[in-house]
Amino acid sequence: MRSFLITILSLVTAAANGTVGTTVTTDAEWRQKIIGTWVPDPSDRNARPGIGTYLGDGALIFDAYETKKCEKRKWRAIAQWRIVNGRLLIKVESVNGNPSSVETNDRIVSISPKRMVLENGKGTMQYRIKSTKCVPESEI
């Protein structure tokens, strides 16, 4: 009877916290999901036009462009990425061949096969979609 009451209490607490039916994604799962090429979602008004490719070896290549048509590249950054405790950590090594020491630390909100949502240290949400084009052609 006691274990039954504890189970019921746990379920009630989980329901109140909104955690019933949720699963925890491990860092290893995030690492598999992030591999590929991502671009800012057209709805993300804070993002600069660009294409970021996350490689399986932890390398990241990011090309920033003048406009959403991605016709003229402004700069290229070479970086290393890793995921620790549900956070995407990026260390930029160079920009256009010049050394850089920029680092980012974003909380991973979600990564699905087609969409990634991150939250930066200032609480700004960042929306990305999996695509090899700067933005979907329908948005240009």
Image (cartoon, helix red, strand yellow):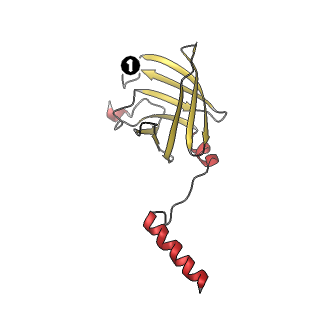
For image coordinates 48% across by 28% down, the residue present is 51
Q: 17 or 89: nearer the eye?
A: 17
Q: 46 or 63: nearer the eye?
A: 46
For mark 1, what is the residue? Answer: 66
Q: 43 or 15: nearer the eye?
A: 15
Q: Of the residues shown, which amino acid type is indicated by label 1?
A: Glu
For image coordinates 37% across by 24% down, the residue present is 69
Place of residue 10 in the rendered image (x, y in percent of width and height, measured from the top left): 53, 72
For image coordinates 43% across by 67% down, the residue present is 16
Position of 10 relative to 137 (above/below): below
Examine the image and state in which quarter residue 83 appears. Answer: top right
Q: Residues within 10 Å of mark 1 (few under 14, many from 20)?
A: some
Place of residue 76 in the rendered image (x, y in percent of width and height, measured from the top left): 52, 19
Position of 106 relative to 52 (above/below): below
Q: Residue furthest right?
A: 57
Q: Is residue 103 left or right of residue 133?
A: right
Examine the image and state in which quarter residue 97 appears. Answer: top right
Q: Residue furthest front?
A: 2
Place of residue 99 in the rendered image (x, y in percent of width and height, measured from the top left): 59, 15
Picture quarter with the N terminus: bottom right
Image mark count: 1
Determine whether the residue tagged by mark 1 lies in a helix, strand or loop.
loop
For image coordinates 51% across by 30% down, the residue present is 52
